[in-house]
Image (cartoon, rainbow, N blue to C red):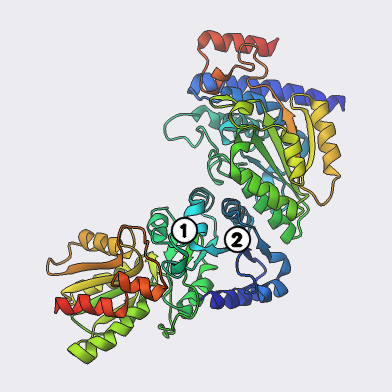
């Protein structure tokens, strides 16, 4: 367990550094939204997903969909670090003509990307279809989705929530990156999300609610809900927008801002120390 | 047509294990046979079309062949963005079936009318837009659809439509000439084709004329090869007939074709369809068609004036 945890911390710090550097170099926004979900992405890719990189077309692979598509800069770094493609491809990030821009494109352009997202509320229903397809085909693998709290404004999320419960899709897992902000304000003030865990529970899902930056909390919650049969599962992960860089944490300006040179230096200094 | 859809899909589901049916809580007893034969491949997705459409995309990307079925407004414009992103952008091989299209549910009012579906889906890259004139075309299109890549929209009527196309070779993107004549070229899309056939009887009787009547079957792909051959046939009038808005459907598409191909100035295009308005004075399909001159008599009146 200790070894696992050290990988988690090391990879999360590395991905955070790369995400901040890329935002600076490519002038790509959504930095706060990326930093809030880095720990979850690292946990999912290093500790959960069963995918063989040399067999990315295996029908029985686990599937991950970044339903909050604006977290793509973090996802791309994770995929590169996992070896889905050569890291140097990310040098084109944000450049004219590159496939690497603000949202994940459809499969076939960037290895490891399972669905094009960016329009919120599409990823969970698509994953539901994929999870059902696995059941129909008798496959043992699962589908994992990362949602944002703002995304839970979308009606299609709740449509999917109801159907997944009635279909008893226990191979469907969702994580909510609950950083308490959406583009223009506090998520609770814009659309009354709370009680979020109760809502999902009442929709028939197996629910846990944890600190989304703490390895042990995420790991315990995942291992616990995994055993639940006949129900889709969700972990509400309390996170901090801009996590890891003190002057970005819980400051919603970093939804759209990109760091200047001094801010980059300060951010990298904080991540190294 | 919808019964033909249900029985043909049941046959397909028996032949292939990848065929699935997603219904938006309609078709009560209609799919009993399908359910009996493939219980785990029939999914009632409830009255939640946005989810149903994205879900179908996910299933198709996982190697299945889903058919999504509900009433046309709800399986098209209600979930348009899910069609655009989930199906068209991902090139997911989903067959969307819109039932009760055009004026089929005339009495149900503008909420259940669909005169814009083809126009809107037509401009999504990669999606085929089909409107079979009868159950023979529908069944042939369904069989071919599951052999093709990418999404397909099939716009169907309700029930009791007459059989018009008895040709052996019905293919997506290929027209069928139902009647070969002269003077008028009538290009028809969907079950309203039967009105043109009826008109032709009267034309022959009263005016001694025989038009050419074509079932287009498909708006996209448009059978341009066939249309090219018609440019030099000397028809003074090309008439398009559709139970759809005159904006963006067959009429507009044929106008684009004529413009693009520098058609002879002697060809005049007349677009018969629903004008740019909502319908307030309701009645059955026959009544509303007659109100807009889209029944056999209305079409006859238009043609008579052109003689």
Where residue A151 appears, as percent x and y from the top left, is 60, 36
Image side of residue B107 versus residue B300, left or right: right
Classify B277 as above or below A65. Answer: below
The answer to whether residue A58 of the structure is visible from this angle is no
Quadrant location, the C terminus of chain B: bottom left
Q: Nearer the viewer's eye, disc 1 or disc 2?
A: 1
Q: Mark 1, chain letter?
A: B
On the image, which quarter does residue A185 sit in? top right
Q: CA distance from mark 1 to mark 2?
A: 16 Å
Classify B175 as above or below A120. Answer: below
Image side of residue B295 versus residue A265, left or right: left
Where residue A101 appears, as percent x and y from the top left, is 50, 33
Where residue A104 appears, as percent x and y from the top left, is 55, 38
Q: Nearest the camera: B246 or A46? A: B246
Q: Nearest the camera: A186 or A172? A: A186
Where residue B205 appears, as percent x and y from the top left, is 23, 92
Numbered badge on residue B111: 1
Q: Earlier in the sequence, mark 1 or mark 2?
A: 2
Q: Nearest the camera: A93 or A66? A: A66
The answer to whether residue A216 of the structure is visible from this angle is yes
Instruction: Please name the residue that numbered disc 2 is placed on.
Output: B24
Neighbour tally class for label 2: few under 14, some 14-19, many 20 plus, Cα within 10 Å: many
Q: Dot 1: what SS?
A: loop
Classify A132 as above or below B289. Answer: above
On the image, which quarter does residue B288 sit in? bottom left
Q: Dot 2: what SS?
A: loop
């Amino acid at each position: 367990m200790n070894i696992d945890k050290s990988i988690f911390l090391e990879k999360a710090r590395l991905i955070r550094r790369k995400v901040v550097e890329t935002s600076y170099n490519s002038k790509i926004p959504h930095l706060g939204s990326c930093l809030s979900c880095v720990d979850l992405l690292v946990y999912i890719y290093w500790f959960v997903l069963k995918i063989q990189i040399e067999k990315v077309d295996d029908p029985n692979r686990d599937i991950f969909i970044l339903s909050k598509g604006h977290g793509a800069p973090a996802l791309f770094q994770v995929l590169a670090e996992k070896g889905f493609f050569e890291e140097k491809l990310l040098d084109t990030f944000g450049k004219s003509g590159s496939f690497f821009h603000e949202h994940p494109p459809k499969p076939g352009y960037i290895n490891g990307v399972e669905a094009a997202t960016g329009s919120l509320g599409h990823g969970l229903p698509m994953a539901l279809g994929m999870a059902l397809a696995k059941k129909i085909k008798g496959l043992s693998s699962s589908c994992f989705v990362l949602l944002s709290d703002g995304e839970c404004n979308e009606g299609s999320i709740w449509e999917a929530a109801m159907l997944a419960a009635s279909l008893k899709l226990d191979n469907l897992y969702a994580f909510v990156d609950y950083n308490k902000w959406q583009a223009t304000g506090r998520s609770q003030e814009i659309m009354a999300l709370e009680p979020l865990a109760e809502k999902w529970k009442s929709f028939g899902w197996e629910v846990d609610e944890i600190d989304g930056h703490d390895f042990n909390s995420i790991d315990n919650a995942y291992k616990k809900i995994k055993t639940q049969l006949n129900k889709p599962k969700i972990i509400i992960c309390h996170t901090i927008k801009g996590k890891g860089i003190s002057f970005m944490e819980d400051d919603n300006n970093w939804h759209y801002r990109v760091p200047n040179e001094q801010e980059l230096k300060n951010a990298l200094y904080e991540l190294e120390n | 047509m919808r019964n033909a859809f249900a029985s043909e899909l049941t046959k397909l589901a028996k032949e292939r294990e990848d065929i699935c049916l997603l219904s938006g809580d309609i078709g009560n007893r209609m799919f009993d046979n399908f359910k009996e034969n493939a219980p785990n491949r029939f999914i009632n997705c409830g009255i939640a079309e946005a989810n149903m459409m994205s879900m179908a995309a996910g299933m198709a990307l996982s190697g299945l062949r889903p058919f999504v079925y509900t009433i046309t407004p709800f399986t098209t414009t209600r979930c348009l963005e899910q069609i655009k992103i989930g199906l068209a952008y991902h090139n997911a091989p989903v067959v969307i079936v819109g039932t009760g299209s055009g004026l089929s549910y005339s009495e149900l009012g503008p909420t259940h009318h669909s005169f814009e579906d083809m126009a809107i889906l037509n401009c999504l890259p990669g999606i085929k837009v089909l409107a079979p004139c009868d159950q023979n075309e529908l069944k042939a299109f369904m069989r071919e659809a599951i052999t093709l890549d990418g999404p397909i929209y099939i716009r169907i009527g309700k029930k009791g439509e007459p059989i018009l196309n008895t040709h052996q070779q019905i293919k997506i993107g290929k027209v069928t000439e139902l009647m070969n004549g002269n003077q008028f070229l009538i290009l028809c899309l969907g079950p309203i084709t039967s009105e043109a056939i009826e008109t032709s009887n009267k034309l022959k009787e009263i005016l001694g004329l025989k038009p050419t009547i074509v079932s287009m079957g498909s708006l996209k792909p448009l059978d341009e090869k066939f249309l090219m051959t018609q440019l030099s046939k000397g028809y003074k009038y090309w008439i398009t007939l559709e139970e759809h808005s005159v904006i963006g459907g067959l009429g507009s598409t044929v106008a684009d074709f004529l413009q693009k191909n520098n058609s002879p100035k002697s060809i005049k295009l007349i677009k018969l369809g629903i004008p740019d308005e909502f319908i307030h004075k309701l009645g059955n399909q026959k009544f509303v068609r007659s109100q807009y001159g889209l029944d056999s008599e209305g079409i006859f009146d238009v043609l008579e004036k052109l003689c």
